[in-house]
Image: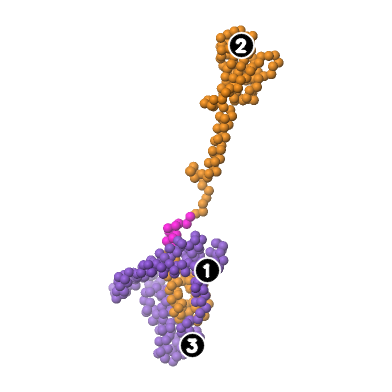
Amino acid sequence: MSPEENQNQHAAAPIRQGAWGPEDWAALVERIRQGDPESMEELYQRCSPGIRLVLQRRLGGQELEDRVQETFLIVLQAIRRGEVREPSRVLGFIWTVVRRQVAAHIDSAVHSRRDFAPIKDGTAIYDPQESPEERLLSQQQRQVMYKVLQKVSRRDREILIRYYLLEQTQEEICSEMNLTETQFRLLKSRAKARFGELGRRVIRQRPLPAVFLRKAAGSTH
Amino acid sequence: MPQNWEHISEETLEQYSLGVLPEDEERGVEEHLLICPDCQRQLTETDQYVQAMRAAAAEYRRRHPRREPKRAPVLVWPHQWPKMVWLLGTACLVWFLVWKFGVSGSGGGHAVAPVAVQLQALRNADAADAAARAPLRLIADLSGLPERSSWQLDVVDAAGRTVGSFEGRPEGGLLEVEIRQGLPPGQYWVRVCPPGAGGQVYREFGLRVR
């Protein structure tokens, strides 16, 4: 299956498991408002991974779990107080809460930097660095991608560099390099497929050292 | 904006990952991401891909700096000259050598037989002709002149300036002298006089060099 077919199939397919329509969300909100603990649990199960993902992308991993819990609590309280005006659009409400959390955190970070408080004893400092295992994986992926870049034609490489490194828009690249939108998308799809293919080959040739994995696992305790 | 129950396209996810998705589309994407494990996984993979591509592209650019477009060099070494320049230069050199030594033959080391020019002292006789810049052997008729062991031939141009003096021994009433470098085109007079005579001319011949 070509990458494009895969992409189209992905875009066209509905959510396979637990696909809910607006009426399902409205019913869930109603049950939560009435104080049903199982419905609260269901909302948490359905939404917390997504909330975590969006918060992590916006704010990083520091105090992530606390922020997820805080966000969920705000949502639950709002539902129970009947503040969600359109229960069928509860996802939009959750998204708004997440974005407000992000904005509040950024605002707070700006103020704390401005006031500059010295670090007290016992304050937890989040290490933004990747774990050794993640670092090795990133390194391997970078090497694979470098090989992909070396193997593609000069023109294709120029397009990929312009898009991913120089952050030129698709329109700018197509205009400057006389490309159609289809050519542009096809090239990107091919590069991604080649990356996946080479990546699988490299990982088969050079599996992660077992000792290293044990160390990484042990480091979490 | 995708509906909550429709998966996000790969293209849109990539734009979201790159941070270039238009703001009005961002909300729909994030709302869907809140509840779709498939798209969450897909986004994680896309993030890894974009990150790897960015790092690799940066490394590639570092190792292969972009070349500026070539400009015509102002000054280059001879070995960098195009073949055409060499061919043209060689042709010019050959032409010059042929012109200098092959045709005129005035070079010292080149043995070209001088052309004999019979100088006549007959009344109303035409001036002798000779080729320009070719070696000449002038043969002057001395008949009727007093006998001497040597005579001198002075060659003067049309303006009366002496361009060469040559001394020789007469044989059989004739005096032969060689002008190896030849003469430039023009009208000349060859005067017969005793060596060191100080301008006493016994006979004069016309010589036209073309």
The answer to whether marks 1 and 2 sit on the same chain is no
Q: Residue tagged by mark 2?
A: B173
User: Do tag 1 and tag 3 residues touch (Cβ < 8 Å)?
Assistant: no
Instruction: Answer with left or right where residue B107 lies relative to residue B145.
Output: left
Q: Is residue A7 magenta?
A: no
User: Do tag 1 and tag 2 residues touch (Cβ < 8 Å)?
Assistant: no
Instruction: Answer with left or right where residue B135 lies relative to residue A77.
Output: right
Determine the chain carrying the residue at label 2. B
Bounds of the magenta span?
B57-67
Mark toward the viewer: 1 or 2: 2
Please identify which colour was used for chain A in the image: purple
Instruction: Give the SS element for disc 1.
Output: helix
Of B173 and B38, nearer the camera is B173
Looking at the image, residue B33 lies above or below residue B48: below
Name the chief secondary structure element in magenta.
Answer: helix
Residue A143: percent from left, percent from top: 40, 64
Residue A76: percent from left, percent from top: 42, 86
The orange one among the chains is: B
Mark toward the viewer: 3 or 2: 2
Determine the chain carrying the residue at label 1. A
